[in-house]
Image (cartoon, rainbow, N blue to C red):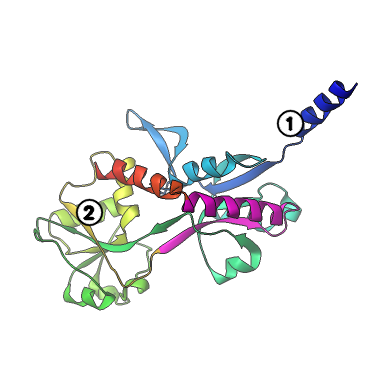
Amino acid sequence: MLILAVIGVLLNNVVFAYEVKICDDEVEYPPYSYYERVNNVPSKKVKGITKDTLTAIFASLDFTYQIDHIPWKRCLFEVENYDKRKRYDMFSTGSYTVERADKYYITSPFTEVYPGVFYSIGQYPKGIEVNKVRDLDQFDSVCGVLGYSYKEYGLTQESKLVRVPSIISGFKMLEVSRCQIMPLAIQAGYGLKLIEKGKVPEVIRASRIKNIKPETLHLFISKRSPMAFELYTKINNQLLLLKKTGVLDEIDEKYRKLYNN
């Protein structure tokens, strides 16, 4: 009877293990989240820093997890309104804002995104140095993607921006000297190599703007989930451990090697 009771407890723990439902943007954001390519065709397999981080976190927790990639606005809405919708406990790969802090428990950062400028070594064979935002004043022609804001870079005059439809288009403009620089997060620019095989010109390089603080990416847990505080404390503690033991740095380095090849 004692053996049967123990087996019953173990089975109950398996059956009732809580599955954390996570959502993220359906739009690819390499190297953080993107679909593996098979013969240059996107598959259904998601890869990236976010996926590897979640796998490392939940490997040591008594939860399982499932992540769905859906429209971003819907993802945020579902997590914020968990008490009514009951679909997603949390979302991943988001940046910190005061408004979000009111709605979600925000974990420690799991990675950083460095602001920088891209240029062509055809125009600048010795590279360029941009230690501060004011250093961008020396450039007369700046490529900017349609719909992107460049206030962070001190660029508020549209007359100084050459608007392009995509990042790849901007890289092509740099390659043929149609503009001098393009402000862009370094990982986001180089990360395109993971999904746009052969489309990022070999002459493209990036320089980090040192006096702009890097953007941090976090996991966000709905305060309206009944598991909210337990999820937050356990996931955050695991994140801190992964940072201290160097696992998060190893994940970042893995993808840096992939897109720098």
What amino acid is labelled 1 in the image?
Val
The stretch of residues the image draws in magenta is: 215-244
Quadrant containing the N terminus is top right
- What kind of element bears circle 2? helix
Residue 7, relative to residue 47: is it above or below? above
Residue 155 position (above or below residue 13): below
Crowding at mark 2 (Cα within 10 Å: few <14, some 14-19, many 20+): many
Q: In front here: 216 or 163?
A: 216
What type is the residue that disc 2 sits on?
Phe
First of labels 1, 2 by sequence position: 1
CB contact under 8 Å: marks 1 and 2: no
- Residue occupied by mark 1: 14
Residue 103 lies in quadrant: bottom right
| Residue 88, percent from left and from top | 65, 48
Q: Is residue 166 visible?
A: no
Give residue 198's quadrant in the image: top left
Label 1 SS:
helix
Find the distance from the CA under tag 1 to the CA under tag 2: 51 Å
Whole-percent x, y for residue 226 in the image? 76, 53
Binning the other alpha carbons within 10 Å of mark 1 as few (below 14), some (14 to 19) or many (20 upward) gives: few
In percent of the image, x 49 and y 42: which residue is there? 51
**Residue 149 x, y percent position in the rendering:** 37, 68
Q: Quadrant of residue 179?
A: bottom left
Relative horizontal placement of residue 185, taking residue 126 as reference (left or right): right
Disc 2 marks which residue? Answer: 171
